[in-house]
Amino acid sequence: MNHKTIRRPHLVVGLLTATVAASALWLFVHAHATADNKPAQAEGYSRNVEGHILVVPKSALEKSLQIAVIQPQDVALPLQLPAVVEADPLRFIKIMTPLSGRITVVRKQAGDLVKAGEVLLTIDSADLAQALSDQEKARAALSLSKRQLDRQQTMDKADIGTKRDLEQAQSDVVQAQAELSRAETRLGLLGAKAKSAGDVLPGHQLVVRAPAAGRVVELNAAPGAYWNDVNQPLMSIADLSKVFVTASAKEKDLAMLSEGQSVTIRFDAYAEPVQAKVQYVADVLDTDTRSVKVRIPLNNQNKKLKPGMFAKAELSTSAHQGLLVPATAVVQHGFASKVYVEVAPRELVAREVTVGPLNNGRFEVLSGLKTGERVLLKDGVIFND
């Protein structure tokens, strides 16, 4: 009992000493933290009961503030559209054949230059053999019907024939001529002409020629392969000396589009922009994407532009009057944008505004600001507490 009585005062004294030391340490740290971390924006201004910012006269803050009167200016916002390079449809040809058969020879490879009329490949086709046979039969039938008509006309002049036989012979000639015309038309649709034209080789091989000059950009045919898909191209020929940049514009942007409009095109592959003009704005809206196609022609003599390349088309729109403020004047407060307006000398009020897209370091104020008001141009973040 005496032992416990002796040790208890020492315990109390120790606890009191530790408490005093901790309190002193807290006061020291708090005092230094408050002094070191005192917000700079609290220097040189105060707030009144209405929340207005009152700048201290002749303070360093007053000297650093830049305030200007906002007046209407011409605003021409660029319209940026995603775009892609496409081949000129009039200069891009898919070589197809309406008949099946075995490919015997391929004369041109991918990347080869071709001239109009040059041989591309040959196909040995049973369909062509049947078409040629029909043509020969039609010719023979026409020749026979003509000789029959000559005999009937001779007999009619000698009054030994009948009118009925003469009329029948005349009808047979007309029918034979129609059948020959049908057979020759079918040969033409198959891409073959008469043998004398040199488009059909021995063994019923069809010669496929280039309909226009260009370069082979796609090749699907190979010698010895049997081609039976008449809906797929054997190869593709393109003249890429002229291409189109096709941009996609949203429905809301239609009012800012017009033919002949100036446009700056920036390609992902090249640093240099290209200046051009809009040739055509589509008359039909794509119901799936709610967008329209904007076609821009470009010369491509150096072949730098490849179909499928991505680009951005920046169109110049007509100017309108608007209020512009530098981007540094707009302060973000959560999801809201605000500027600081001087309502009296050295008295600022935060004003929530609606701004348009950033354009050359400036925002167009769409609402919340009036002409002639004085706006803080920068450092508004100081008051954004």
Image (cartoon, rainbow, N blue to C red):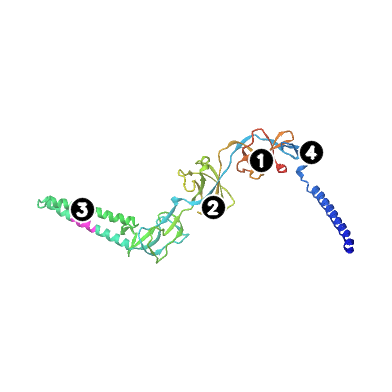
Q: Label 2 neighbourhood size at 10 Å, few (<14), some (14-19), many (20+)?
A: some
* SS class, disc 4: loop
Residue sitting at 16 percent across and 50 percent down?
Answer: 167
Q: Nearer the viewer, residue 23 or 33?
A: 23
Of badges 2 and 1, nearer the viewer stands: 1
The magenta-colored residue range is: 139-147
Q: Earlier in the sequence, mark 4 or mark 2?
A: 4
Q: Which residue is mark 3?
A: 173
* SS class, disc 3: helix
Left or right of 6 on screen, residue 355: left
Q: Is residue 144 magenta?
A: yes
Q: Which residue is mark 2?
A: 310
Q: Nearer the viewer, residue 217 or 58?
A: 58
Q: Is residue 109 magenta?
A: no
The residues tagged by marks 2 and 1 sit, at their Cα atoms, a distance apart of 37 Å
Amino acid type, label 3: Val
* SS class, disc 1: strand
Q: Which residue is mark 1?
A: 338
Q: Earlier in the sequence, mark 3 or mark 2?
A: 3
Q: Kindly tell me whether residue 15 is visible in this rendering.
A: yes
Q: Are marks 4 and 2 in contact (CB under 8 Å)?
A: no
